[in-house]
Image: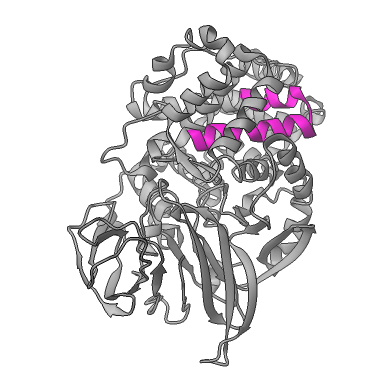
Amino acid sequence: YWRYFVDTVGYPNVLPHFPFSLISLSLSPSYHQTLDTKDLKVSKVTANGQAAKFTLGPKHSFMGTPLEITLPFDLSRGQHVIVEVTYETAPNASALQWLTPEQTAGKKHPYLFSQCQATHCRSMVPCQDTPAMKHTYYAQVSVPKELVAVMSAVRDGEEPDPQDSSRAIYHFRQPVPMPSYLIAIVVGALESREIGPRSRVWSEKELVDKAAYEFSETETMLKTAEGLAGPYVWGQYDILVLPPSFPYGGMENPCLTYATPTLLAGDRSLSNVIAHEISHSWTGNLVTNKTWEHFWLNEGHTVYLERMIGRSMESEQFRQFKAMGGWKELQESVNTFGANNPLTNLVPNLNEVDLDEAFSSVPYEKGFALLYHLEELMGGPEVFMGFVKSYIQLFSYSSITTEEWKHYLFTYFKNKVDILNKVDWNAWMHTPGMPPVKPQYDTTMADACIALCKRWTKEGDLGNFSEGDVKTLSTHQLIEFLSLLLQQEPLPLSHVKRMQEVYQLNAFNNAEIRFRWLRLCVKSKWEDAVPMALKMATEQGRMKFTRPLFKEVYNFDKYREEAVRVFIAHRAAMHPVTANLVSKDLKVDNDKST
């Protein structure tokens, strides 16, 4: 298990005493234990209460420093050892973002959140920071009593801190084994609302009611997922809406899904993100990739399950429509990395690769495309979902590789091995670029989007467009229409100005629509859109939006310096992962910009 005592006072020199305990270590015959660390200041190590020798090895540029511990006694078979490490995290720990009151919605209290995936947990906790290792944990968190702590675990009560009457201690337990990247902690002025029999939504009070409305379908999604994949084993399923700097759409921390505030569109149209994170409760959290080369096992299956939830709650046409959108996202990732870049392999070689820089939609959408292709070959969604459910049951609580997945696929479909043998596995798994097979998706829901896109790229008379063109389109279809236009050559400036005139797209607050619309405008060199694009890039920090918006402005030669200036001005308020990657996108020297 793990034991935490977290102190949020003393910003930025935080976590002054953050002891760590781990029971039942896997120890080598020489009684050495190696733990991953990154920028941790280790002051003491004990084993069963006795002082233990420890050394910190050479520092790697992004993987951190090994902590080598030598036990002070001989071991006997079956003996349990409690190793306790006393240390401090660094103010710039890559897993942690410490927000000042000004960076929060309430403007009164500081805020802390962690984001450990893929290999950042080592900057918060000395651990075996690999998805191959799973553990349970319990925690005690001491915080100022006006703040609330939540973790990726079941809440297990709270009490006044006996050592300080101005503080409270929150207790947590996670009885289901999980990898280190799923450890999460959040401390802030949080409130919650019940949204289901096993779910609450958490956020600052300014957003909590809006979030409760947006995520009111959570229990329906959970029940739908259970019908597809089997029982939900984690007990509680809470959602926490983070401050705007959170770099991802969501994060599947057990018992506490993170969600970006950019999902609060007011129309529940972006709930597929929650369907995705719910799906991770089975594919990713229960069955986990053994190493990050096999990340597609987490994400490809999760996208498949997410879209099966959409199929159950909406329609098969809706699933097909979302799959088409995913194919375009995959094409964009391949274009960004380059069609010959080995990072676009489904199973890439990640030796000496910074995983943050390798992150893309490839494991998500190339993985889904393979599973959809196999679904078609094996007999349709019901047949293939039977395999997915069986795969989850077999490999629950373990971490696996692509070869183990493939071996079970051939075992499950033993009567169809001749068909499986015809799949070009090397092209799918180990070849860069787009997949070898392009699925033929049902275009029913996309036809109106495709037709409107063609009109804007072919029609000469701009007077033929009217607000009625988009009146019948759903939010999902409007997003698809703009996505299609982004795949074309930039529209003439006259066209985007006319589009604003008739469709009033500047007035849309839905983040997915606004993001695509502003990119479209900047690509067409509409100067009025540049400040709006930079505003969206900095008022929230979701990398899906922030990085492309900065890049579009940077590629507009006249405003390249402005993009760099705005980034440097806002860098300190950004999440460390976001700031690092945007600095590389804009070719900004990290040292000079801090």
Report the residue at 77% width, 49% height from top.
219
Q: Residue, x 42% and y 39% (percent of image)?
A: 359
Viewer-nearest residue: 574 or 275: 275
Residue 588 as seen in the image, left or right of residue 261: left
Quarter of the figure with residue 515: top right
Q: Is residue 579 left or right of residue 41?
A: right
Q: Is residue 525 visible?
A: no
Q: Position of residue 67 (x, y in %)?
A: 25, 62
Q: Is residue 403 left or right of residue 594?
A: right
**Residue 373 on the magenta span:** no
Q: In the picture, which quadrant includes the C terminus?
A: bottom left
Q: Is residue 218 above or below residue 166?
A: above
User: Is 233 drawn above or below residue 415 in the view shown?
Assistant: below
Q: What residue appears at the point 62 percent right and 14 percent down from the top-left corner?
A: 378
Q: Which residues are magenta?
A: 297-324
Magenta span: chief secondary structure = helix
Residue 303 in magenta stretch: yes
Tell me if residue 175 comes above or below residue 52 in the rendering: above
Asked which quadrant contains residue 354, the reply is top left
- The residue closer to the viewer here, 56 or 399, is 399
Query: Quadrant location of residue 291?
Result: top left
- Residue 22, percent across and down? 40, 66
Nearest the camera: 575 or 38? 38
> In the image, residue 472 lies at what x, y percent?
82, 28
Do we see residue 433 in this rendering? yes
Picture coordinates of residue 505 (x, y %)? 69, 38
